[in-house]
Amino acid sequence: SVSELAQKFQQYLEEAILDPEMFQSGNVSRFVWQPITDIHLQSHLPFELEPNGNIIYVYIFAIVGVFVLILACINFVNLATARYMNRAEEVSMRKVYGARRTQLMRQFLWETMLYVLLALALALLLAEITLPGVNALAGKHLTASLLTSPFALGLLGILLIVVTLMAGGYPAWVLSTFRPMAALQGQGRSRVHHPWMRNGLVVGQFCIATALLIGTMTVYGQLHYVQEKQLGFDKAHILVVEDARQLGDSYRLFRDRVAALPQVSAASAAHSIPGRPFDAMPFLPEQPSNFQETSLAYTMVDEHFAEVLDLHVVDGRNFSPAFSTDSSAFLINQQAAKVLGWSDPVGKQLDYGYGEGTVVGVVEDFHFESLHEAIRPLVMPYIRWSPGFLMVRLRHGDPQKTIAAVRAIWQDVNPHRPLHTSFLDQDYQRLYDSERRMARLFSIFSGLAILIACVGLFGLAAFAAERRTKEIGIRKVLGATTMQIVTLLNKRFLTLVSLGFVLAIPLAWIALHEWLQHFAYHVALSWWVFALTGGGAILIAVLSVSSQAVKAALTNPAETLRYE
């Protein structure tokens, strides 16, 4: 039992390992247990083995996929019920010859299942063809063999039954309820007619499609925000040398030789850099302070760290070789001074596991982590041993030549280890890879949703125009213009689409507000995003319906009335 093991382990710590007074004061770390299978999707701790996924996004895209499938089912229901009059006589004749209602429903459900089976076969073929593109889009390595696993086959079987019942259940019920006499006399539509059902499905369809469009625009807006927001440091033109610990005590020699290159303006060594995990440890601040002892994020840096990142020292000074005491000194950020409660932090003492030192400067707060996190207090002791990274600020020019020069110095100083480099701005942007993939997938899903909704609207408009052929012919004979006819046919559909948009607003707002809470810094939900999306959905609906309306309006009245 996990809970029993965790309880015994904590009891062992309290009795045999740690000072009981520490537990009484609450100033002690707790050990958290988690299943290995939960780490990839549900763990977001520092120093994970690899970038983890997010179970929230799995749920989001599963729900969106279901919504797109529901849109297709709504189309089938709408178009099947709209066209049922074409089969009224067939159904009535079957009833006259003794067919029972259950037999008729089974017949229509089997017909629907045939459609779904054909769609499923086509979907499997398309899935295999588009798999390389999907992998590139989602950043995964999926294989077609996943679709033949017992779990996938079982899921597809369940999907086949569920979609058949969703798409074919209502039309089968409608078609099986015809009264033979009424249908044969041409009164089937009046006997079995549920416009509220069809109208409700159109509203639901555009509600889902519009909500997805609003979501797509907001996700792209948040991505633009995190890419353009001022981070408090300049991440451009900085070459990162990875695994600098391999240099050992030679890192200063390597750093100084690189800094002397004409293509380089400055070089710095640090244990961690923006966009990478920052460790934390307990610090004892000089009193009076808000804490006797507290855990703070930290990274050891040299005297060039602020220069390379273009950090602003707002109080005190930067590290300097002119001061021999700086070997045990600290820089802190503004948030650290605020959390510790120091109004005048320069000159204050800090003590930690490697000794005591003095705060010589305060740098302006900068986002050393992603915008998912609020800026934390950060302590920057002067570097004491070989760093994890070297940062090299490049001058304008050909970066490949500079990298080649840095590589030559590396081979001279450390010939037995390979050099690994990257660029800081690209590394930092990788923090938002999952959001970028989400935006791309959302745009595809939204496009599919709008396309499916418009196809359904197009079909319903064609049916409405066909059903009102005689009315349109008479109106034209009496002097109605093409624009009046188009307006007449658009009016009902625009009402339904507008209602769908109104219902989408609170749903989209709640979902997006919840998603944005995963960012400590995010865009506001602007009214213009909702207005623009609603206007776009209405415009698309108008174009879909108008194409059929114009066709009906331009038809010669003599031909339509003769047809009727």
Image: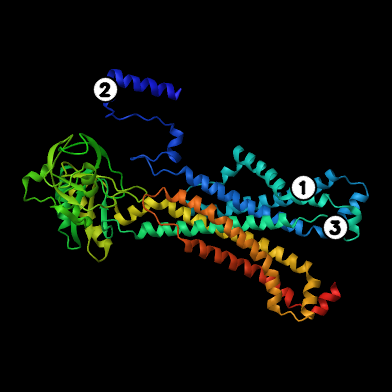
Q: Which residue is mark 2?
A: 18
Q: Which residue is mark 1?
A: 109
Q: Tell me the amino acid under the disc marked 3.
A: Gly
Pinpoint residue 408: horizontal percent, then vertical percent. 21, 55
Badge 1: residue crowd in 10 Å (few <14, some 14–19, many ≥20): many
Q: Tell me the amino acid under the disc marked 1.
A: Leu
Q: Secondary structure at mark 3?
A: helix
Which label's residue is closer to the chain start, 2 or 3?
Answer: 2
Q: Nearer the viewer, residue 371 or 341?
A: 341
Pinpoint residue 549: horizontal percent, then vertical percent. 70, 72
Image quadrant assignment for residue 101 = top right
Which label's residue is closer to the chain start, 3 or 1?
Answer: 1
Query: Is 530 on the left-hand or right-hand side of 492?
Result: left
Tag 2 near tag 1, CB within 8 Å: no
Q: Secondary structure at mark 2?
A: loop
Q: CA distance from mark 2 to mark 1?
A: 69 Å
Badge 3: residue crowd in 10 Å (few <14, some 14–19, many ≥20): many
Q: Identify whether 467 is placed above or below 293.
A: below
Image mark for residue 179: none
Query: Is 159 on the left-hand or right-hand side of 362?
Result: right
Between disc 3 and disc 1, the foreground one is 3
